[in-house]
Amino acid sequence: MRILVTGDKGYIGAVIVPMLLKQGHTVCGFDADWFEDSSFVELLARIPGKKKDLRDVEASDVKGFDAIIHLAALSNDPLGDLNPSLTGEINHIASVRLAKLAKDAGVQRFLFSSSCSTYGAAGGDALLNEEAPLRPVTPYGTSKVRVEEDVAKLADSHFSPVFLRNATAYGVSPRLRFDLVLNNLVAWAFTTGRILIKSDGTPWRPIVHIEDIGRALIAMLNAPREKVHCQAFNVGRTDENYQIRELAEIVNRTVPGCRVEYAQDGGPDRRCYRVDFSKLARVLPECKLQWTAREGANELYQAIQEVGLQLDDFEGPRYRRISHIQRLMNDGRMDSSLRWLEKVAQ
């Protein structure tokens, strides 16, 4: 297929693009590249693409593609909270516009990277399947719900959207982030000898390796249309639901000489949900997700050890999305609407 990947230079995109190329697909990118100064290692694949804001997408940008994998977004809750109206503008309105342009251009399959954060304040220990009520508690989660609702209305016999509700991602990437729970805990352990828990440790989180997100996306591309058309799929493994304190213990057993600490003001987190991932395994049994939290923690520890990560790097803006964006604004490179102020080559 000829595939357009939005957000190809992001945390997930930088891992998925080489996977798609290995499958024999022709891949083009579309990314504002806000995090060009935040590489952990060099990007593994260079593909043709446009350095362009999602809000500025045009019909010509999507013409001639068989499928679009839409990853580009304000990528987590703190960044989404920076300006909720911008989160709606970029994550919701621009995403729906992209889907409409794709449909008009004859793109047949539209894979949207949604999130299990749509379940938000579900609470309790019950496993949530794709029919569970959506209760987002942040602008980021709300934006994902609204895109699913609006893009589903565009579905017809020629345009087939699919919604991948990813668990919280982890794993090593050329554009590594340390504002994700398992990545964060491993980095704390390595750089300080402490595993700092900012809640009371009880909230539930399902987690999934970014390579397994890539496997799910590839399975959705290859699946017969009738199996996936206009459906939501939770992406992860049911046995990879953890309480934060359980993840801390995994990291404690992975990184030598560290200890677990709880923040004094830490309390329950409203974002608490356990997720049932059986639909993905049932509908697409060929999609084998491979990673576990223990393996992921070890992969992160080995990568961090190899580059000799320092506390200043970990705590600074290089690997934290919200801090990086704030630095770009403070340096006069980005305005308050999250647009580049310097001229960007197309």
Image (tube, rainbow, N blue to C red):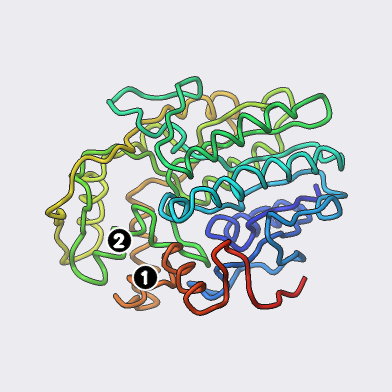
Return the x and y of residue 157 as percentages of the image width and height: 82, 24
205 displayed left or right of 97:
left
Q: Residue at x 21, y 59 (%)?
A: 195
Q: From this view, report whether residue 316 is shown above or below residue 212.
A: below
Relative to 310, is 236 above or below? above
Which secondary structure, mark 2? helix
Q: Is residue 272 left or right of residue 41?
A: left
Residue 85 as seen in the image, left or right of residue 94: left
Task: Give the crowd class for mark 2: few <14, some 14-19, many >=20 residues within 10 Å.
Answer: many
Q: Amino acid at mark 2?
A: Val
Q: Identify the residue at image location x=71%, y=77%.
A: 343
Extreme left residue here? Answer: 264
Q: Position of residue 177 (x, y in %)?
A: 44, 62
Please identify the quarter of the rendering in which residue 30 is found.
Answer: bottom right
Q: Tag on residue 217?
A: none
The residue at which mark 2 appears reads as: 186
Q: Amino acid at mark 1?
A: Ile
Q: Is residue 294 or residue 129 the one in the foreground? A: 129
**Mark 2 to mark 1: distance in Å?**
9 Å
Name the residue beneath numbered marker 1: 304
Residue 28 position, x and y percent, is 76, 59
Tell me whether circle 2 and circle 1 mark residues in contact (CB < 8 Å): yes
- Residue depicted at 39% across the width and 34% down the height: 120
